[in-house]
Structure formats: C-alpha cells, structure tokens
Image: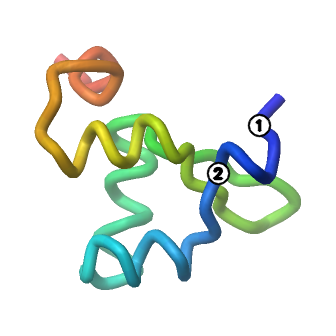
C-alpha cells in the first residue's frame, strides 16, 4: 500500500518536474511512477525522483518493450 508520506500529489509532482499535467500522467502510466487511488493520482516519491535524476532503476524496468 502506498502511504501518503511516500507519495506526492499530481500537483506537487508537476511543480517539481515543471511539466504539463498530461506529461506527468503519461510518465505515471508508462514508467509506473504513480497510481490512481480513488480517482486521484499519487506519485511514488522514490521512483519519481530516481526518474528525474535519470537513474537506472524501476522506471526502466516498467517501460514497455
């Protein structure tokens, strides 16, 4: 279960990444950076910051082949 302290709202993540909402939601779907809970997206902090740093981690493992 994703706890609130381990996640960001979509608005918080957009402010950090400085991208459009549709871009961030696309990243969440494609790279597994977030999940939809009760109709709202929550972005996984660890995966999100790794993705922004360009780390080789979970984000690449979730990319479709």
Where, quadrant-wise, is the N terminus in this rendering? top right
Q: Earlier in the sequence, mark 2 or mark 1?
A: 1
Height in image: 9 above or below 35?
Answer: below
Residue at horizontal 33%, vertical 53%? 27
Q: Between 17 and 36, which is closer to the camera in this rendering?
A: 17
Q: Between 30 and 48, which is closer to the camera in this rendering?
A: 48
Contact between marks 2 and 1 (CB within 8 A): the answer is: yes
Which residue is situated farthest in the front direction here?
A: 5
Determine whether the residue tagged by mark 1 lies in a helix, strand or loop: loop
**Mark 2 lies on residue:** 7
Residue 64: percent from the left, percent from the top? 25, 24
Where, quadrant-wise, is the C terminus in this rendering? top left
**Mark 1 lies on residue:** 2
Residue at horizontal 56%, vertical 53%? 43
How many numbered discs, if any?
2
Residue 60: percent from the left, percent from the top? 22, 23
Residue at horizontal 44%, vertical 50%? 28
Residue 24: percent from the left, percent from the top? 36, 66
Determine whether the residue tagged by mark 2 lies in a helix, strand or loop: strand
Q: CA distance from mark 2 to mark 1?
A: 7 Å
Residue at horizontal 35%, vertical 59%? 26
Height in image: 4 above or below 23?
Answer: above
């Amino acid at each position: 279960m994703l706890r609130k302290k381990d996640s960001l709202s979509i608005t918080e993540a957009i402010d950090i990444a400085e991208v459009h909402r549709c871009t961030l939601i696309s990243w969440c779907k494609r790279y597994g950076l977030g999940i939809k809970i009760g109709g709202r997206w929550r972005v996984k902090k660890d995966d999100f910051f790794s993705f922004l740093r360009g780390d080789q981690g979970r984000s690449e493992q979730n990319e479709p082949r």
